[in-house]
Amino acid sequence: MNDIDKSPETSESNNPISNGGEKKNGFVTIIVIALILGAVGLFTFLSIQKDGGTSGSERDRVFNTEGATQFTTVDGAPADLSQFDGKVQVVNAWATWCPFCVQELPDLAELATEYADQDVAVIAINRKEDPARAKAFIDSLGGLPGITFIMDGDDNFYSSIGGFSMPETIFYDAEGNVVVHKRGFMALDEMRQHVEAALAASETND
């Protein structure tokens, strides 16, 4: 009699099949919730990107990073980079201690002269050096006419573009979109190719 009374006592909580099903259902629920949260997060991010949370071109987002020291000229005056809006821009990160910059800057000056009448601006941003040192370096290379030299007191430009080599140069189209990001030294012929690509991209955007 006692044996008959005890035999049905196997409860649902002790049933391995039941427990396995509950664990599986719980796992699936967690995955579904994670996917929903991920989709909501992605939608929010894309909405912010589109509606102005990080509005402006790729170039603008680099040049206008919050908290960055204001760009200045070699003489210490505030630098207004908005004067180059609507132009193809060749933006080069350089420093006096960079041996390849000695080779590349004169070619950038030549490039600026060649494309002076085609709405192409060549900008060389110095990486956190003393302005007097930078100016002496530029003067030692003949002044490098045609290049707009900018001082970046906190090295914001280089860090914003994810720089890891020297020099680094970005070719922007007229709308501020990156066409080419060149890491390392370039010869003049390569510079011309990238400028032509940026000009072509600007025409396509029109």
Image: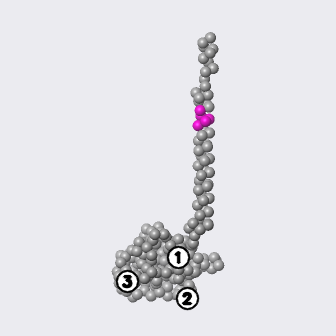
Disc 3 and disc 1: Cα gap in Å?
24 Å
- Determine the secondary structure under disc 2: loop
Q: How many marks?
A: 3
Disc 1 and disc 2: Cα gap in Å?
17 Å
Mainly helix, strand or loop, the magenta region?
helix
Query: Of the residues shown, which amino acid type is indicated by label 3?
Result: Lys
Q: Image quadrant for the C terminus? A: bottom right
129 versus 14 height, above or below: below
Q: Which mark is residue 117?
A: 2
Q: Which mark is residue 49?
A: none
Point out the tag, 3 or 1, that comes first from the N-terminus. 3
Say left or right for 132 vs 194. left
Point out the tag, 3 or 2, that comes first from the N-terminus. 2
Q: Image quadrant for the N terminus? A: top right
| Mark 2 residue crowding within 10 angstroms, few (<14) / some (14–19) / many (20+) | few
In the image, what residue occupies the spot 59% across and 52% down?
A: 37
Q: Position of residue 91 (x, y in %)?
A: 49, 77
Q: Nearer the viewer, residue 202 or 4?
A: 4
Disc 3 and disc 2: Cα gap in Å?
26 Å
For label 1, the residue is 171
Q: Position of residue 27 (x, y in %)?
A: 59, 41
Q: Confirm whether residue 145 shows in the render.
A: yes
| Mark 1 residue crowding within 10 angstroms, few (<14) / some (14–19) / many (20+) | many
Q: Are marks 1 and 2 in contact (CB under 8 Å)?
A: no
- Determine the secondary structure under disc 1: strand
Q: Confirm whether residue 181 shows in the render.
A: no
188 versus 61 height, above or below: below
For label 3, the residue is 135
